[in-house]
Amino acid sequence: MEDYSFTIKYDDGKKDKHEIDAYVLADAIKGFADFSVSLMQSSGSASSTRSVVTEIRPGCVEVEFLIRSAFAIGEMGFSALGYMSTFQSVIELFRGLAGRPPKSVESTGDGNVVVQTNNGNITINQNTYNLVMASPNMGEACNKFIRQPLKAGLEQVSIASGENKISSIEKAEADSFQKLDLKDHLHEYDSTVWLRIVRPVLDGSSKWTFDNGSGAPLPADIKDAAFLTDVKNGVHRFGNGDYLYVEMKSVQRRVGRKLSSENSIQKVIKIEQGAGDQLTLSNSV
């Protein structure tokens, strides 16, 4: 069993007597528990993680938490310091997004993504980003332990772990910490990948079909105008086993109760031809 401590400090700006509404504090405690446990579980600790309050101290109203996991953080693939960094990254992601979808998301190729927010770029682990985008609970948790206390009259919320400061959020930033207004847009990211051509479309605007190694067909629009012009003019020939090295944008959406993915190739960087029969516009059907 491993324990990781956090302290949340609610500052009302007063120099003498400090207070916070009991209902707001109760919601804040639950919100922080939901936030921290969800973040821990996203790293592999499953249902064996829980949050406990160990002390509520006077002086700007401080609440001390223990996040208790049956597994050492190191056994889940990252360090305690890494967990604090991830915690901080999620807070900064909400701060940057300010309640709105990201402008763009690009994979770095090492398990992270660079998110272009309304207030600059943030680099964050891909799985952590997916958790924030796909789980409305994270935004609601932030609303409870950050936004609601600030809206109730507090001036600042500070989060720390021991001597390590994680973040401070001012009253003016309160509305950034709430459920993201994503509507049906769940997740978007850019990647540079190799794709095997399964079914090319040598004329018209239909989607090409590719194999990306997942075992399932991957349909994609091609937006590279220069490449499409060369295809139409018969410059490129395609056969079984041919590959495209491309820049691709992928968007995951919610349609009713189902999920759908849309892929569009922004640029064809390289073509690698295999040994199969070649296909051009003139002999395609």
Image (tube, rainbow, N blue to C red):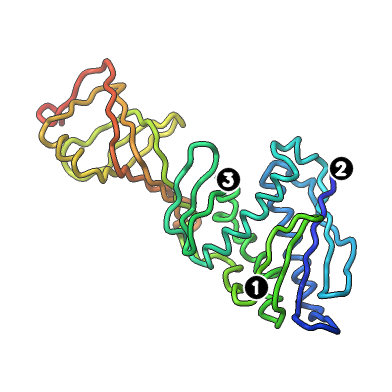
* Residue at which label 2 appears: 1
Q: Quadrant of residue 6?
A: bottom right
> Which amino acid does the dot numbered 3 rest on?
Asn
Q: Answer few, some or many: residues within 10 Å of disc 1's Cα (few below 14, many 20 plus, some between 14 and 19).
A: some
Tell me the residue at 68%/62% (across/down).
167
Query: Horizontal and vertical percent for residue 184?
Result: 46, 60
Above or below for 279 versus 99: above
Q: Nearer the viewer, residue 214 or 264?
A: 264
Q: Nearer the viewer, residue 51 or 171?
A: 171
Q: Classify residue 125 as left or right of residue 225.
A: right
Dot 1 or dot 3, earlier in sequence:
3
Q: Which numbered circle lies on residue 170? A: 1
* Residue at which label 3 appears: 125
Dot 2 or dot 1, earlier in sequence:
2
Dot 2 or dot 3, earlier in sequence:
2
Label 2 close to label 1 by CB (< 8 Å): no
